[in-house]
Amino acid sequence: MREIDNVFITHFHSDHLTGIPDLWLTGWLPPPFGKRTTPLRVYGPAGLKNILEGMRQAFEPNIQIRIVDERLPESGVQFDVKEFSADGVVFNEQGLTVTAFAVDHGEHIKPAYGYRIDYAGRSVVISGDTRFDENLIEMARGSDLLIHEVAAARQELINFDERIQLILNHHTAPEEAGIVFSRASPKLAAYTHFVLLNGPGAPEVTLEELVKRTRENYSGPLQLGEDLMGFEIGETVQIHKILSLKFSGEMG
Ligand SMILES: [Zn+2]
Ligand SMILES: [Zn+2]
């Protein structure tokens, strides 16, 4: 985990934040988990610094115990927070740039950003959580890989509980994502962040149905994302279904 030294946050919904303490603190532990000795850099919209200070406070007893007991370096448990409050390049190192762009996740869900990563003529665009968004299409046009969120529920469920439609309104339906993919025309489109709602008498929309609904508007390459899936971008975009979990060999 220490090999992850830059983290990019899209927005402040809990499902996009609750993984931070584990990455941050477990990555600081002795091998095989981490052994980070330098601050973890975290990029995100204004307000992030406050959130991370709160996390630091929540884990302060743990941090002090480990510094005294395991002699872990204080430097490895610090955050180096890089906030931004407008669209633009937020990271630029060794020829790799990351550009943040605002997306539309709903009236009350601000700030919300997506990211575009450019390196050596290749590009990856990550939608973040968003509704159908013209700005995202512009940013993703001609990219190598577009990683996009998606949400769906059966009509019975939408009829049964009005809150379901409220949730869906914050996200992109598969038919809409199909339009985004068609217009942006990436070499590969990949789904992540599957919001597939269910309830009494209304099972989740299946992945097969999700693809079928996407195909109403898009016939290009489409991949369903999975945990630990990797993408290698060269002339073509290769998919690695299982990233090998490398342990350093040292045991803590
Ligand atoms: Zn969200
Ligand atoms: Zn989310």
Image: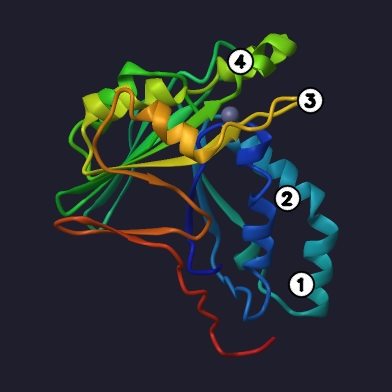
Residue labelled with disc 3: 200
> Tag 3's secondary structure?
loop
For the residues marked 1 and 4, what is the alpha-carbon distance in whole angstroms? 54 Å
Which one is in front, 52 or 228?
228
Q: Nearer the viewer, mark 1 or mark 4?
A: 4
Which image quadrant: the C terminus? bottom right
Residue at image coords 68%, 18%: 157
Circle 2 — which element?
helix
Q: How many angstroms separate mark 3 from mark 1 (CA)?
A: 49 Å
In space, the residues marked 4 and 2 are separated at their CA atoms by: 43 Å
Quadrant of the rendered image containing residue 67? bottom right
Residue at the bottom extreme? 250
Which disc number belongs to residue 67?
1
Q: CA distance from mark 3 to mark 4?
A: 12 Å
Instruction: Inspect the image, locate mark 4, and give the three-letter code of the amino acid beneath it.
Output: Gln
Residue 14, compared with residue 202, is above or below; it is below
Tell me which amino acid carries mark 2.
Arg
Dividing the picture into quadrants, the one containing residue 158 is top right
Q: Are marks 1 and 2 in contact (CB under 8 Å)?
A: no
Q: Which mark is residue 56?
A: 2
- Say which amino acid is labelled 1: Ile
| Circle 2/circle 3 CB separation < 8 Å | no
Q: Dot 3: few (<14), some (14–19), or many (≥20) neighbours within 10 Å?
A: few
Which one is in front, 76 or 239?
239
Q: Is residue 140 left or right of residue 226?
A: left
